[in-house]
């Protein structure tokens, strides 16, 4: 089990290049199942989850030519329409092969993803949507068996906004007969990035980025080249780390228009933020002020930034409320932060954070991807050494995080 050791107290200074977005890359890699042509993806982040998704596609018969931050897929010899439990249990996003497999081959066998640390995370909306499009679905021995001669367009209403639910059904509808309308669809920027890739492949999609997406099915999709959008959560994580350590950093090759609420909250906390094209500069002098946040579907405050703002509030001036409305158990980082001296009370999906003037380094344990990022930020500001265990969570979603942080002046090293 690898660990990270961090000596706190160094303000982050300098420049960092933002990688491609994990949550855009994962659905877009699954689009390779929708065509027999080549799909070339550039600006892919070098992450554990991207490797897992590639292997999942390869075991189905998709050819993958790998280069640095780039993969060229070819789906002309797909002969296995199954996503086995061993691969799905480590990465829930594997459910994203279901829609494309049913749409192109009329047959799919995908393991039900287990729950995970942050919640039960059912996939009932994915299944309901495919049934509405005419798929016969049986759930046996922990697997989803889906069959359909030809999917038909349908009007599908999501009673809960689901990011991968929207993405799965958008891909399925791209090859269905007729028109599909997704209502109460997810508006996340990663949904738009997937729609852009599908359009480049010949799909007919409008309304992505709003809560009402219309997809007109086509006979076949052809190959394309797509550049993955920058990772807004990696961007937000580095900005919060700079604000928490009283630093001054510039993010390169990112976008500000996908981070509005996060930039607003950081400004409220006292950061000076300037945007110049694909760069964002943040300057923080003095102690941050507490800022309350409430997570909700995009364009509201993203749940994937909740843990990072919790740790910022731990050392801020004042008290703040952090309300998590998306997942039922996304406060796993609270007890770890308390070990570092944080003052946090939790009542249901609401936590009240009272700022302390400093945290004390200790040994803590990562429980999920974004909780681990929050513990890294805590280590950067704590007095003394913080050792973070189970950092495989971190490697799933942050490309080369310790080298990027070291370049910014952090005293951080990986312990094998
Ligand atoms: C995506 O997960 C992201 N993952 C998550 O990022 C992100 O936290 C989440 O969206 C919310 O923004 C990827 O894009 C790969 P949902 P997803 O379906 O799609 C309930 C990270 O750290 N729901 O939008 O799985 C669900 O339980 C990860 O990068 C159902 O009830 O999330 C949750 O409460 C963590 N039935 C809510 O909807 C369903 O069929 C939102 O889930 C589907 C979802």
Image (spheres, rainbow, N blue to C red):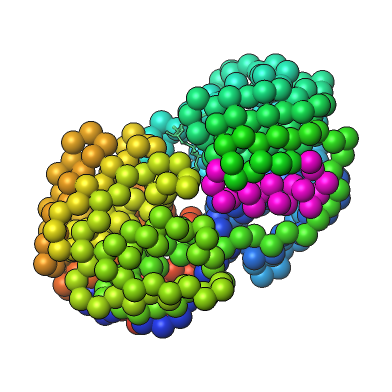
- Picture residue at 23% right of the left edge, 74% below the top: 8
Q: Quadrant of residue 20?
A: bottom right
Question: Would residue 87 appear left or right of 9 to someone viewing this image?
Answer: right
The verdict on residue 190 being magenta is yes
Residue sitting nearer the eye, 139 or 207:
207
Expressed as whole percent of the image width and height from the top left, the position of residue 352 reads: 17, 46
Residue sitting nearer the eye, 262 or 81:
262
Question: Would residue 91 appear left or right of 408 to someone viewing this image?
Answer: right
Give the magenta range: 187-204
Q: Main secondary structure of the magenta part?
A: helix
- Picture residue at 77% right of the left edge, 28% below the top: 179
Q: Quadrant of residue 318?
A: bottom left
Expressed as whole percent of the image width and height from the top left, the position of residue 37 reads: 86, 50
Is residue 338 visible in the rendered structure shown here? no
- Picture residue at 75% right of the left edge, 25% below the top: 153
For the C terminus, the image quarter is bottom left
Above or below 53: residue 219: above
Q: Quadrant of residue 103?
A: top right
Expressed as whole percent of the image width and height from the top left, the position of residue 259 reads: 46, 58
Expressed as whole percent of the image width and height from the top left, the position of residue 379 reads: 25, 67
Above or below 343: residue 410: below
Residue sitting nearer the eye, 74 or 219:
219
The verdict on residue 42 being magenta is no
């Amino acid at each position: 089990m690898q660990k990270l050791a961090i000596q706190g107290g160094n303000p982050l200074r300098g420049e960092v290049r933002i990688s491609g977005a994990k949550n855009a890359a994962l659905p877009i890699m699954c689009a390779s199942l929708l065509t027999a042509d080549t799909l070339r993806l550039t600006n892919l982040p070098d992450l554990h989850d991207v490797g897992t998704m590639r292997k999942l596609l390869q075991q189905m018969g998709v050819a993958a030519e790998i280069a640095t931050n780039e993969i060229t897929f070819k789906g002309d010899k797909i002969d296995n329409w199954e996503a086995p439990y061993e691969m799905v249990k480590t990465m829930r996003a594997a459910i994203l092969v279901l829609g494309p497999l049913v749409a192109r081959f009329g047959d799919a066998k995908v393991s039900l993803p287990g729950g995970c640390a942050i919640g039960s995370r059912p996939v009932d909306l994915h299944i309901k949507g495919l049934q509405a499009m005419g798929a016969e679905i049986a759930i046996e021995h922990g697997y989803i068996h889906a069959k359909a001669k030809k999917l038909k367009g349908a009007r599908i209403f999501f009673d809960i906004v689901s990011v991968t639910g929207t993405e799965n059904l958008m891909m399925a509808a791209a090859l269905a007969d007729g028109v599909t309308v997704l209502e109460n669809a997810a508006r996340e920027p990663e949904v738009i990035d997937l729609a852009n890739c599908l359009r480049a492949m010949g799909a007919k999609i409008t309304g992505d980025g709003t809560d009402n997406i219309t997809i007109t099915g086509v006979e076949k999709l052809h190959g394309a080249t797509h550049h993955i959008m920058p990772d807004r959560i990696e961007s937000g994580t580095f900005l919060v780390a700079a604000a928490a350590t009283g630093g001054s950093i510039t993010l390169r090759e990112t976008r500000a228009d996908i981070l509005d609420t996060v930039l607003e909250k950081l400004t409220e906390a006292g950061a000076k933020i300037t945007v110049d094209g694909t760069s964002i500069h943040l300057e923080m002098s003095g102690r941050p002020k507490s800022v309350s946040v409430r997570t909700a579907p995009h364009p509201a405050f993203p749940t994937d930034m909740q843990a990072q703002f919790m740790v910022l509030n731990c050392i801020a001036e004042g008290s703040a409320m952090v309300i998590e409305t998306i997942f039922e158990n996304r406060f796993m980082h609270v007890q770890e932060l308390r070990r570092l001296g944080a003052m946090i009370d939790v009542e249901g999906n609401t936590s009240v954070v009272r700022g302390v003037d400093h945290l004390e380094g200790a040994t803590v344990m990562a429980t999920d991807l974004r909780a681990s990022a929050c513990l890294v930020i805590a280590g950067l500001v704590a007095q003394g050494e913080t050792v973070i265990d189970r950092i495989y969570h971190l490697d799933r979603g942050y490309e080369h995080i310790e080298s990027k942080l070291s370049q910014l002046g952090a005293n951080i090293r990986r312990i094998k």
